[in-house]
Image (cartoon, rainbow, N blue to C red):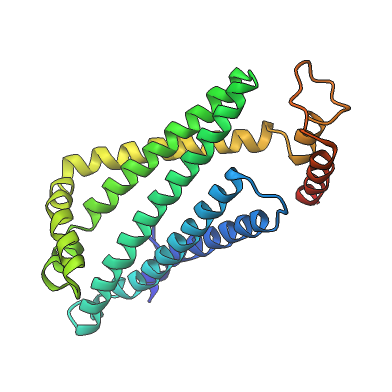
Amino acid sequence: MQAALEGNGSQFMQFRLGVAVAIIESYALYQTLSKQDKDTRDYTRIAGAFVLVASAIADTAASSINMVMVMGKYRATDVGKAAQFRLGGFSFWGGMLASVGALFGAIDDYIEASRQFDQRHPVLFMAYGARFLANVGIAILGTAVTLASSAAYLSRIAEQGKTALARRLASILAPLARSLASAAIRGVLMAGFAVTSWAGIILTLGFWFFGDDALEAWCKRCVFTTESEPDYYADYAEEVGAFHQALQDVT
């Protein structure tokens, strides 16, 4: 029990981190769902947040199972074998769902980068473009790392999967997973994944610190704006609706 709760690779710490991510993404999902007039970006964010919540739940379940696996007396028992199989499944789906969530984030950044390009904001265009590339990298490298970590799980599904479709898909992915699982390739993939992940985190923090909140963004588009080339709202009703939504977002 002590080994599961302490140490550099504390599974209990990873469990709590998974819970924290699930809470944060659930709040983001609630905030977007509560908006009255949703656009394409909002629906993209809803889909991304929903997938990331599911990924965090899977990762949390994997961490809880791993706490059992850390206690050596269970490894050679039937409980340990069953836990190892479940651990592989939760880790696989947690990683794959996180990669899908990164793809939704890339779509959201692409939409915003296009909007900034049309409004002739080169700095914001490059920033959102950079985060788009980071999210694409996270999705691709995250999928590769997940496959590399799931070679044993996929091999077992290929042999003992409950459905023909599951066995077929696993038999296709298993050889690729075994190739990616080699120490050299896996090390390169994990290093690349770490670099792109940190790039995405730094860019996101930059947007939080230096970006406009909803009310500031409304002020730049309303009839009272001091912008040299403002992107006015289409009509009075849209402007008033956006104002109420901005007040809701900042309060």
Position of residue 85 in the picture relative to residue 247 (left or right): left
Task: Name which residue lies at 65% across and 38% down.
Answer: 208
| Residue 69 x, y percent position in the rendering | 29, 73
Indicate whether 229 appears above or below 130: above
Indicate whether 25 appears above or below 209: below
Position of residue 121 in the picture relative to residue 174 (left or right): right
Indicate whether 79 appears above or below 202: below
Residue placed most toward the observer, 109 or 213? 109
Indicate whether 96 appears above or below 223: below
Task: Name which residue lies at 13% across and 65% down.
Answer: 158
Residue placed most toward the observer, 237 or 11? 237
Position of residue 242 in the picture relative to residue 145 (left or right): right
Res 162 quadrant in image: bottom left
Res 15 quadrant in image: bottom left
Task: Name which residue lies at 30% across and 60% down.
Answer: 92
| Residue 46 x, y percent position in the rendering | 56, 54
| Residue 66 x, y percent position in the rendering | 33, 69
